[in-house]
Image (cartoon, grey):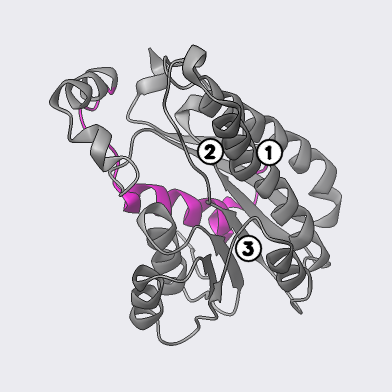
């Protein structure tokens, strides 16, 4: 399978750790020039050190106007991966407005704004991958807002794919099950919750960050040239129930 990305310029938000870092490293190995986006941190420094060539980091807030100006000002963006996001699991009755606003802003509004900015730098086509979730296809307790935001991303993916196809821009989402990352580790360290998750996944294991990164590579590489408007669910069978 041809997954050659030599010379392609790839912007990845939420890039410094977890799924974002794995995506950066995978695209970099495929030959892409990566443009990782994340707040300044030791993790970001470590990523840049691990990819000393073909790496043009941008440090700051992914929700900022400064990032939009930076992306729109690029000579060319071939690939955009919208990975930044958050989750604040709570029963619906306990969700404060500030939690609601935080998840809507980062998971939906930022994804939309960054995508819109990237279109300016994709005059000759491109590929966009939104990191969604299996929760964009199902419901789950204590995740009403998270599910709402990820269902929104699935709708955005389809609408963008239809609107932008004539411009040569393919748009897809990757919808992971639980992945062991710094964000999910505290939850997965709970024996009762971990057992529940593994019962819900027919394959009996959570995903790795590399599983998600390889899915992004497939959709953004030459092998995915006929795929747009699709959600690639990487969930070990969770949503097959």
Name the residue that disc number 1 marks.
157
Disc number lying in front (2 or 1)? 2
Q: Quadrant of residue 46?
A: bottom left
Name the residue that disc number 3 marks.
79
* N-terminal label among 3 and 2: 3
State the residue in front, 169 or 154: 154
Residue found at the very far bottom of the displayed protein: 53
Residue 132 is tagged as 2
Does the magenta portion include 102?
A: no
* Alpha carbons under labels 3 and 2: distance apart: 17 Å
Q: Up-down: is 100 above or below 180?
A: above
Give the extent of the magenta segment. 201-228
Residue at disc 1, secondary structure: helix
**Residue at 70% from the left image edge and 56% from the top image edge:** 114
Disc number lying in front (3 or 2)? 2
Q: Position of residue 214 (x, y in %)?
A: 41, 53
């Amino acid at each position: 399978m041809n997954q050659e990305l030599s010379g392609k310029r790839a912007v990845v938000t939420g890039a410094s750790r977890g799924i974002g870092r794995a995506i950066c490293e995978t695209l970099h190995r495929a030959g892409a020039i990566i443009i990782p986006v994340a707040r300044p941190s030791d993790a970001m420094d470590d990523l840049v050190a691990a990819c000393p060539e073909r790496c043009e980091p941008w440090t700051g807030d992914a929700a900022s106007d400064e990032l939009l100006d930076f992306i729109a000002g690029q000579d060319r963006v071939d690939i955009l991966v919208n990975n930044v996001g958050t989750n604040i699991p709570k029963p619906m009755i306990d969700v404060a407005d500030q939690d609601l606003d935080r998840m809507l802003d980062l998971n939906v509004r930022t994804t939309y704004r960054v995508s819109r900015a990237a279109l300016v730098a994709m005059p000759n086509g491109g590929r966009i991958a939104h990191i969604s979730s299996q929760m964009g296809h199902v419901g789950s307790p204590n995740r009403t807002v998270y599910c709402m935001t990820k269902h929104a991303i699935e709708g955005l993916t389809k609408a963008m794919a239809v609107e932008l196809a004539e411009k040569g821009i393919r748009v897809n989402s990757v919808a992971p099950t639980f992945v062991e990352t710094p964000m999910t580790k505290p939850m997965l360290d709970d024996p009762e919750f971990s057992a529940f998750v593994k019962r819900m996944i027919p394959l009996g294991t959570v995903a790795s960050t590399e599983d998600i990164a390889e899915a992004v590579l497939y959709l953004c590489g030459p092998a995915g040239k006929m795929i747009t408007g699709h959600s690639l669910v990487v969930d070990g069978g969770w949503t097959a129930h």
